[in-house]
Image (cartoon, helix red, strand yellow):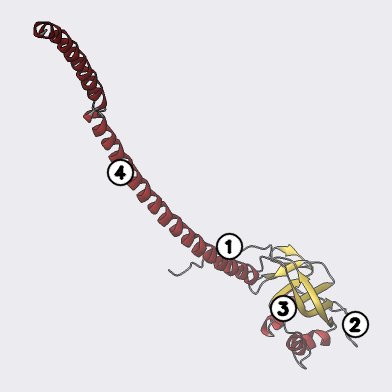
Amino acid sequence: MAARGQSHNPAGAIAVAAVAVGFLLVVQFRSMQAVRPTPAVPVRRVEEMAVLVAQAEQARAVLEEEVARLRHRLAEYERLTAEGKALTAALAEEAALYRVVLGLTPVRGRGIEVTVEAGRAVGVPLPATLEANDLAGIANELWAAGAEAIAIGDRRVLARSAFRQSGPRIVVDGAPLRPPYVIRAIGPADEMEAVLRIRGGFVDGLRAVGVTVRVQRRQVLRLPAYTGPLTFRWAEPVP
């Protein structure tokens, strides 16, 4: 019986060993799959991404600098525009004043209206005649009394306007005037009327020789712009 037991045990041991070896192989195979490493990102790809990030940061810095420069320029333009508008407004106001002084723009205002006509003096057989010097004298009286603008008929005259006689006609700044002569002056009505009514004054002398002079106050007078010459042949501005 001892001999049969020894002949049966080797086969069972071999089977058991085979099963154990198989089990160990399966376990080892599964463990190797479990610990297999994840593929790593290539080093070259990482370097390329780093370069792209650096370039993006540099581009952003350049854009921020450009935006700051443009904002500064915009602020400077806005400042210059504001100053330019103020300067333009001041120049326009000054130019408008010069145009009024030079008579280059129509004006309106309170003043007096003087109508001058030839007449006949009492006891004088010949009728009185009107000459250029007579109208120039009345205009000078009005300027001296504070007139700011004067027109004779539809003709604006200035302090430097030239009155001359051309036969029977009176010519102002090259333009002939037609009677009756109506002189309109904007300015202080009291002073202008008073200077024309002075006894022994210029207008009193015209009336003495038969010239009719009528003076009326006007609340609103409208005078045209000056259209005569403004050139200077001899005078030059001093630098």
Look at the numbered disc 2 and give the secondary structure of its residue: loop
Q: Quadrant of the C terminus?
A: bottom left
To which residue does mark 3 refer? 139
Q: Amino acid at mark 1?
A: Thr
To which residue does mark 4 refer? 58
Look at the numbered disc 4 and give the secondary structure of its residue: helix
Horizontally, residue 14 falls left or right of residue 107, namely left
Whichever of callouts 2 and 3 sits on the residue coming sooner in the sequence is 2
Q: Amino acid at mark 3?
A: Ala
Task: Report crowding for label 2: few under 14, some 14 to 19, many 20 or more residues within 10 A (C-alpha).
Answer: few
To which residue does mark 1 refer? 231
Mark pair 2, 4: CA separation: 108 Å
To which residue does mark 2 refer? 125
Whichever of callouts 4 and 3 sits on the residue coming sooner in the sequence is 4
Whichever of callouts 1 and 2 sits on the residue coming sooner in the sequence is 2
Q: Position of residue 25 (x, y in %)?
A: 20, 17
Horizontally, residue 102 falls left or right of residue 63, namely right
Q: Position of residue 151 (x, y in %)?
A: 74, 71
Task: Report crowding for label 1: few under 14, some 14 to 19, many 20 or more residues within 10 A (C-alpha).
Answer: few
